[in-house]
Image: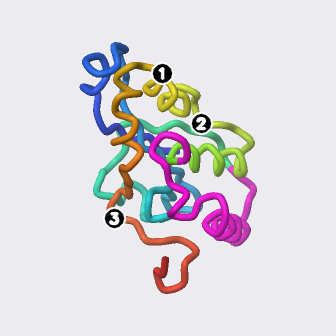
Amino acid sequence: MVRKQFSRRTGYCCVRKQLEGIWHTSIVVHKDEFFFGSGGISSCPPGGTLLGPPDSVVDVGSTEVTEELFLEYLSSLGESLFRSEAYNLFEHNCNTFTNEVAQFLTGRKIPSYITDLPSEILSTPFGQALRPLLDSIQIQPPGGSPVGRPNGQS
């Protein structure tokens, strides 16, 4: 699992809590990096998005799941839970995807300080005030290729 940091400075001044970072997560499996954004599920070589190499990597274990089975699983996720229109910055995002896939592959979840961050931000007056604006944001890290869509079709 790869964590990429967007901002360390957003923390205290905005939500009155020191945040280590606002995380984009993805998972590296079978020599590719997979992630979810407003464009659906995408893949690239590890560290291949325009976000660059990760700031931090958390090892969630290894898997016995074959590449063929994994790609079938991703395809089914892309047609159900993780369609592009299902993306929501706070409630159904890259961290939700990485957590789901990590559990499928290894039985382990990603760290709660990553998955709990959206609710921590929204529990503040600043987060509540910004929610309407933030709900409209669609994030798709550039540099990936669509997964499970023939010829890159949405």
The relative height of residue 118 versus residue 145 in the rendered view (above or below) is: above
Residue 43 x/y as whole percent? 47, 65
* Mark 3: secondary structure: loop
The relative height of residue 41 versus residue 6 in the rendered view (above or below) is: below
Q: Nearer the viewer, mark 2 or mark 1?
A: 1
Along the viewing direction, whichever of 32 and 141 lies nearer the viewer: 141
Residue 99 x/y as whole percent? 61, 43
Disc 3: which residue? 143
Disc 1: which residue? 123
> Going from the N terminus, do you reach mark 3 or mark 2 first?
2
Which label is found at residue 110?
A: 2
Q: Is residue 49 left or right of residue 36?
A: left
Kind of residue indicated by mark 2: Ile
Residue 110 x/y as whole percent? 59, 36
The relative height of residue 15 versus residue 32 in the rendered view (above or below) is: above
Q: CA distance from mark 2 to mark 1?
A: 21 Å
Q: Which residues are magenta?
A: 63-92
> Going from the N terminus, do you reach mark 1 or mark 3 first?
1
Which label is found at residue 80?
A: none
- Taking the magenta stretch, the answer to whether it contains residue 64 is yes
- Taking the magenta stretch, the answer to whether it contains residue 36 is no
Kind of residue indicated by mark 3: Gly
Tell me the residue at 51%/62% (across/down). 85
Kind of residue indicated by mark 1: Ser
